[in-house]
Image: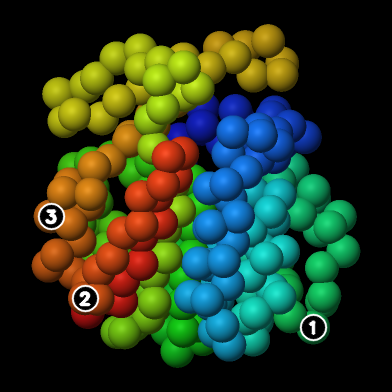
Amino acid sequence: MITNQLTQYYAVNADNYDQVYAQEARFDDLDDLQEMIAELFQDHKVLELACGTAYWTDLISEVAESVHATDISQEMLDLAASRGLDEDIVTFEQMDAFNLPDGLEGQYTAVFAAGLWAHVPREQHEKYLKTLRAKLGKDVLLVLLDECYVDGNSTVIARTDAEGNTYQIVTADDGQRYEIMKNYLTDSTLRKRFAAHTKQFRTERLEYYYLLSCRLK
């Protein structure tokens, strides 16, 4: 989940958050993802969780009716706001994706998160899906984008806990080392965890990323 250590790591690294998207090896995946995401969010009212610097917000805003982009990190939101996105379509708010406020139901037809699901402990997947359903309502489109583990590119796994969650040791721009939970999930694991709580479940697995879409039951 979003621990203090994880929040601090992303805050410190905010300025370099988008560097991963500049890796030439990922360009083909990103081209495919941009096309798929644009199709999924056409004319939707989107709640974006953990928007980071608004890399994906920018794309979604071109096709969606509206995007409310949220992040727990004010440093990320400051960078996101600097993109100069259309204020008639995009709004920003500081929000903890794991402590969603009441009053969201009926406001959105879709929810999107990139890079968030890897930080959800495996044992809390179903609980979080129940929370999304309770907060956002039935039939809302849920789209999750996250990374696949790629030898020689991904940070190596430092340890695995008793629940099967995997952790990486990363060095931030402040020189400090952080232990970050980062789960790389198979399609079968995702399908099992989502089956009871969603419908129209689908995954698209590329080399560096996977894209999951479904509707909350």
- Percent coordinates x, y for residue 90 in the rendering: 73, 74
Please give the residue where the numbered disc 2 appears in the rendered image: 199
Rendered position, 107 above or below 127: below
- Percent coordinates x, y for residue 41 in the rendering: 53, 77
Q: Residue at x 65, y 79 (%)?
A: 63
Q: Earlier in the sequence, mark 3 or mark 2?
A: 3
The type of colouring in the image is rainbow
- Locate residue 5 relative to residue 63 in the image: left or right: left
Q: Please give the count of numbered marks on the rendered protein.
A: 3
Please give the residue where the numbered disc 3 appears in the rendered image: 192
Q: Amino acid at mark 3?
A: Lys
Q: Residue at x 87, y 64 (%)?
A: 84
Cα gap from disc 3 to disc 1, whole angstroms: 39 Å
Q: Amino acid at mark 1?
A: Asp
Please give the residue where the numbered disc 1 appears in the rendered image: 88
Q: Secondary structure under badge 1?
A: loop
Q: Residue at x 35, y 17 (%)?
A: 157
